[in-house]
Amino acid sequence: MEREQYLAAIKPRMPEKRYIHTIGVMETAIALAQKYGEDVKKAETAAILHDIAKYADIEWMERIVRDEHLDSRLIGWGSELLHGPVGAYIAQSEFGITDEELLNAIRFHTTGRAGMSRLEKIIFVADMIEPNRRFDGVDRLRKKAQKNLDKAISACVRHTLAFLIDTKQPIYPLSIECYNDIMNREDSEG
């Protein structure tokens, strides 16, 4: 499918504000893919589809998790975490996407994970720094993304975890594994 077909498919599934966010993620992901030598088409597709399940019924998403034998730890975490893995399921089942790296970029765009690919990092960062995002520290994250993708993913993950801790929210295990992996890599590099 082409960009316009994907955009037409996602638009009715989300409020206008989320659609605008998705366009921002797409544009940011394309720019980061060009900058860091990633497949632009894959980045574009993953960005467009990353929030396709964001507004899906939670009970339906939990049923998909059970029926498709996805990570059972997702049950009870709500839309914020369910929509990534269920979005990957929709990308595969409805749109016929079989590229595992592209599916993983959708699947892990909220939690991150240990051993993220460059495409996964691009979608994670693009989702956080797209132009419509407004939160303290976003400009610093945008600057990091222009200089070094690994430093940007590190900063984005640390920002997310700090927010979750500050707001007394639980942290999904994959996010902790992602953080630990990043810290271990940074320690071994310098």
Image (cartoon, rainbow, N blue to C red):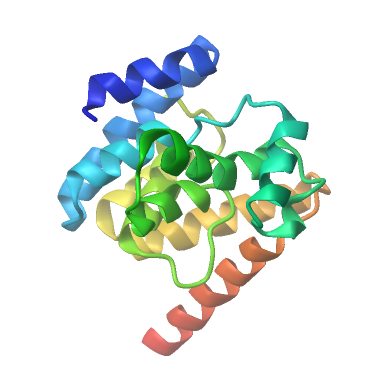
Residue 169 location (% of width, % of height): 80, 48
Q: Is residue 122 visible?
A: yes
Residue 51 location (% of width, % of height): 50, 32
Side of 145 relative to 103 (left or right) = left
Side of 14 relative to 143 (left or right) = right
Residue 3 location (% of width, % of height): 24, 26
Side of 62 relative to 151 (left or right) = right
Residue 155 location (% of width, % of height): 48, 58
Q: Residue at x 54, y 17 (%)?
A: 14
Side of 172 relative to 174 (left or right) = right
Q: Residue at x 50, y 30 (%)?
A: 52
Q: Which one is in front, 157 or 12? A: 12
Q: Which one is in front, 4 or 28? A: 4
Q: Residue at x 39, y 63 (%)?
A: 151
Number of marks drawn: 0
User: Looking at the rendering, which quadrant does residue 157 occupy?
Assistant: bottom right
